[in-house]
Amino acid sequence: MRLSNILEPRLGARGLTKGLSKIKELEISGCEELTSSLEKEDRCFPHLISLVRLVIEGNSALVEDLGKELEGLLQVPILACKLEYLEINNCERLSKLPKGLRQLSFLQELHISHCSSLVSFPDVGLPPSLKVLEIHYCPSLTYIAKYQIPQNLKRIEIWECGSLKSLVEEEKELVVSCSSSFSVSLEHLEVHGCPSLTSLSPRGQLYRALKHLEIYACEGLELIASDRDCGKLEVSPEDIRNLTSLKELEIDCLEGLTSFPSNLTSLEISKLKSCKRLWELEWGLHKLTSLKYLSIKSEDPDVLSFPPDGKEEMLLPKSLTALTIGWFPNLKKLSNGIQFLTSLQTLSLKDCPKLASIPEEGLPLSLGQLSIVRCPLLKERCQPGKGRYWPKISHIPHHTWL
C-alpha cells in the first residue's frame, strides 16, 4: 500500500480496521499532515498487525519531530505489529531516532538516507534483532550507537556521513570489557566518504567475524587505538592476525599496514601513492595463497613495469584467477612476472596511458578474458589481425577494447 502526497488524509480506523490488519507493506511519501490524523483516538496504525515493511519518504509530519510524531508512531502503534524492515528517506528535520526503535523486536533491516539533520541514534541502543544497518548521506551523524552495536548485526554500510567520528561513542566514565561494545557477528563492514571517522571499533579492536571490509575516503581513520594524531590508517600485526574470517578487503590507502590477513580471497587497493611498500610488507602478496582476485590502482609515477623487474615470481600469488591494474601514469610494460600466474583467467588493464608492452613470451595460456581500457598504445598493438601482439594474445577467447 502506498500513500503519496496526501495533504489531509482521512485514515481513521473506523470502517478500515479489517482491511488494515492485512497490510504487509506500507510506503508513506510526502503526507505532511498524516501524523495529526494518526494521533486521534481512531488512528489506524495499531491495527497494522501484519505490517512487515514500512518506508517513510519525504519531510512528512510523520518524521519531522522525532520526539513526537515518529517516536509516538514507533513506540505505540508499531509495537502491535511484526515490523522487519524500516526505511526512512529525505527527512531533513529528523535529528534523532526515537527510543521506541529498540522495542521493535522483529526488526531485521534499518535503512536511512538523506536525513541531513540526523545527529545520533537512541541512547538506549538499536533493536537486538537487527541484522542489516545502512546509512547513506547523513552529514550530521556523529555515531550510530551510544554504548554497544547489536550482537546479531551482520552488515553495516555507511556512505557519505561527513561528521561521523566513531561507530560507537566512547564514554570515559563507562567501564566495559574490551569485547562487550562491538558486534561478535558482524560479517560485512563498508564505510565510504567519512573523513572525520577516527576509529571503527572501541578501544581500537577490529571485528573478528568480518568477512568483507571496505574502506574508501576515510582520511582520518585509525584502526588501532592511538594517543597521537597521525592522520593515517594504522593496523597492528595483532589486529591483522585476529581477522581470521576476513575474505574480502577493499581499501584506498596502504600506509600503516604491516601485513594482510592471511585468508584473503579478494583484495582491492586504490589510490596507492607508492607501490614500493606493497612489495616490502612483512606478509607480502605472494604469501596470500588463497587470493583469487587482486586489483591495484596507483598513481605512483615511479612504476615503469608491473610487477617490478627482478624476482617477479616472488611478488604475486600464483593462486590469482583475476587481476586488475589501473591508473599508473608512467607504466610502460607488463613484466615476465605475469607469466608465472598460471591460474589467471581474467586480466584487466585500465587507464595506463603509456602502457605499450607485454612479455615477449606472451600472456598466460590460462587467460579467458583480456580487457584493455583507456590504454591507447597497448590497444593499438593488440588489434585483431594487425597488431604487433595479436599473435601472442589470439588464443584468448574474449577481448574488450575501449
Image (tube, grey):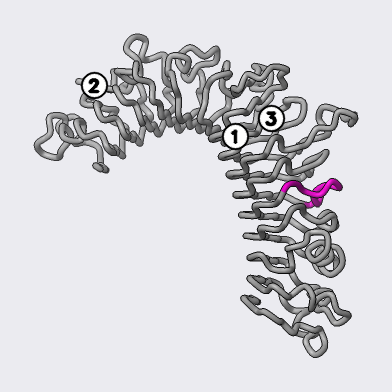
- Foreground mark, 2 or 3? 3
- Specify the amino acid type for callout 2: Pro
Magenta-highlighted residues: 119-129
Residue 79 versus residue 116: which sits nearer the camera?
116
* Image position, residue 228 (x, y; %): 69, 17
Q: Amino acid at mark 3?
A: Ser
Q: Earlier in the sequence, mark 2 or mark 3?
A: 3
Please say whether residue 389 is one of the residues in the magenta stretch. Answer: no
> Any magenta on residue 128?
yes
Instruction: Quickly name the residue at label 1.
Output: 195
Amino acid, disc 1? Pro
Pick the quarter of the image with the C terminus. Answer: top left
Image quarter for residue 398?
top left
Q: Which residue is mark 3?
A: 199
Residue drawn at (80%, 32%), measured in percent from left and top?
Answer: 170
Residue under label 2: 359
Q: Residue furthest toward the left?
A: 386
Crowding at dot 3, Cα within 10 Å, few <14 / some 14-19 / many 20+, comes out as many
Identify the secondary structure beneath mark 2.
loop
Residue 318 point in image, percent of width and height: 42, 23
Q: Position of residue 320 (x, y in %)?
A: 42, 29
Q: How many marks?
A: 3
Please state if 243 lies on the left or on the right of 176 as rendered. left
Q: Indicate left or right for 116 with 179 as reference.
A: left
Label disc, if present, on residue 390 of the rendered structure: none
Query: How far apart are the two marked residues, 1 and 2, measured between alpha carbons?
Result: 41 Å
